[in-house]
């Protein structure tokens, strides 16, 4: 069965085409176009206009790369939430149009759950992980427990990627700033004290961001600030992930989201896993970032488990919570 997935929760419009190969996910194509504001953060309407401008061409490109015709598609999936309203509506509209034109079923999926399921779908040994999902807007620790994907810990304010990007923007670094901060951090020599905000199982980043910016105002070495920012934020993320693993008694940890590209974060989480005798997984980068293949894959496994949607069920949900998803495809 061949599924096309349309991702459009925030700055990226992604089209992925996947095929089921004996229960695991084979990606036939996975194209992404990212909206980059000239200055400032993401304006939802501008990002949505960007997606409108590119979605049709991207679908054609994805079909061409996958070397299939539109008639070969069996199912259309799209990101139903959470995310920015105008962006979600654009992806949903494209998916509805495609589903009607091709006369194929449509399924709306939860973006955060897709980040986890693509890891399970593409890494054969990764069966029941705790997911540390670190992206621009989202930061959550998610695991399957008693019939649902539950959020064991999450940010109380901004996502970790947002924290890095805001810090970078204030300093005039290009967007996204995460990779640049990682480079500076490698040259860091001195740890500067920063607020470490773990609250129960949750986490907060805005105090950390303010304090890091204050060090910049005081002309502390940029490399040392970046190093300290990473060490503090990633240690806190690792701590809440470990607590979720201990609580759920799971022996696997999976990374997802754009910040999972960061080697220092990978090293910290993998060391924690090793200490616990647990397995550490990180999918390849193209399916870690926001992408259409993960949307297609989750749509497929939902469909396969019997989920069906009418057009009236495809209304977007900006605040679609991970634990609102009825999980019918595993136990
Ligand atoms: P996503 O929202 O999942 O597409 O991820 C985008 C976020 O990942 C942005 O906030 C980037 O700054 C961040 N990011 C990308 N590469 C890295 C990296 N090497 N280190 C830290 N953050 C990164
Ligand atoms: Mg994401």
Image (cartoon, rainbow, N blue to C red):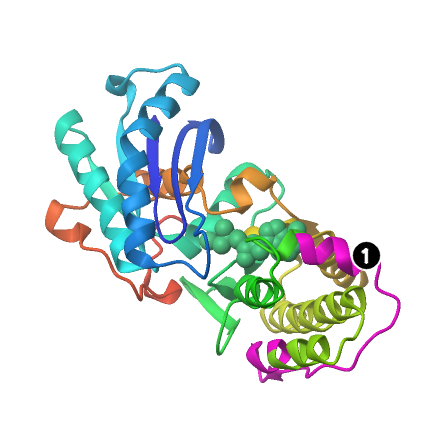
Is 306 placed above or below 208 here?
above
The picture places residue 168, in percent across and down from the top left corner, at 61, 62
Q: Residue at x 42, y 19 (%)?
A: 66
Seen from the viewer's position, the closer of residues 210 and 233 is 210
Q: Write down which quadrant ligand 1 falls in.
A: bottom right
Q: Residue 170 or 147: which is nearer the viewer?
A: 170
Task: State the SS at label 1.
Answer: helix
Question: In the image, is residue 249 part of the stretch drawn in magenta?
Answer: no
Residue 4 image-quadrant placement: top left
Q: Residue furthest right?
A: 189
Task: Identify the image quadrant of the N terminus.
Answer: top left
Residue at figure coordinates x 67%, y 71% from the top left: 233
Q: Which residue is mark 1?
A: 186
- Determine if the magenta segment contains residue 187: yes
Of residue 251 and residue 172, the one placed in the foreground of this image is 172
- Please provide percent x and percent y for residue 221: 80, 70
135 shown above or below 61:
below
What residue sits 40% from the left and 62% below the top? 147
User: Quick one: quadrant of the C terminus?
Assistant: bottom left
Q: Residues within 10 Å of mark 1 (few under 14, many from 20)?
A: few
Magenta highlight range: 180-209
Mark 1 vs ligand 1: CB below 8 Å: no
What residue is drawn where x is 17% and y is 39%?
Answer: 96
Residue 202 appears left or right of 67: right
> x, y percentage for residue 256?
56, 52
Is residue 94 depicted above or below 265 in this figure? above
Asked if residue 128 shows in the view, the reply is no
Q: Is residue 182 visible?
A: yes
């Amino acid at each position: 069965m061949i599924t096309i997935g349309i991702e459009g929760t925030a700055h990226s419009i992604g089209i992925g085409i996947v095929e089921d190969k004996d229960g695991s996910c084979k990606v036939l194509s996975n194209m992404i176009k990212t909206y980059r504001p000239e200055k400032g953060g993401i304006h939802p309407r501008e990002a949505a206009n960007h997606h409108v401008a590119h979605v049709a061409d991207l679908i054609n490109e994805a079909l061409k790369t996958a070397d299939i015709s539109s008639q070969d598609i069996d199912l259309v999936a799209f990101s139903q939430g959470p995310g920015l309203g105008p962006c979600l509506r654009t992806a949903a509209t494209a998916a509805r149009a495609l589903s009607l034109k091709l006369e194929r079923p449509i399924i709306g999926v939860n973006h955060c759950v897709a980040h986890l399921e693509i890891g399970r779908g593409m890494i054969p040994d990764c069966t029941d992980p705790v997911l540390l999902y670190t992206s621009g807007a989202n930061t959550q620790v998610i695991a399957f427990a008693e019939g649902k994907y539950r959020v064991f810990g999450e940010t109380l304010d901004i996502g970790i990627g947002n924290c890095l990007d805001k810090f970078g923007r204030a300093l005039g670094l290009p967007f996204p700033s995460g990779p640049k901060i990682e480079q500076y951090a490698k040259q860091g020599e001195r740890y500067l004290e920063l607020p470490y905000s773990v609250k129960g199982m949750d986490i907060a980043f805005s105090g950390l961001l303010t304090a890091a910016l204050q060090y910049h105002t005081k002309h502390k070495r940029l490399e040392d600030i970046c190093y300290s920012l990473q060490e503090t934020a990633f240690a806190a993320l690792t701590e809440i992930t470990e607590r979720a693993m201990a609580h759920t008694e799971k022996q696997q940890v999976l990374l997802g989201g754009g910040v999972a590209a960061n080697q220092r974060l990978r090293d910290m989480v993998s060391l924690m896993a090793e200490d616990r005798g647990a397995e550490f997984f990180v999918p390849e980068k193209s399916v870690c970032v926001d992408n259409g293949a993960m949307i297609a894959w989750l749509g497929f496994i939902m469909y396969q488990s019997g989920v069906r949607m009418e057009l009236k069920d495809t209304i977007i949900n900006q605040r679609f919570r991970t634990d609102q998803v009825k999980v019918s495809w595993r136990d």
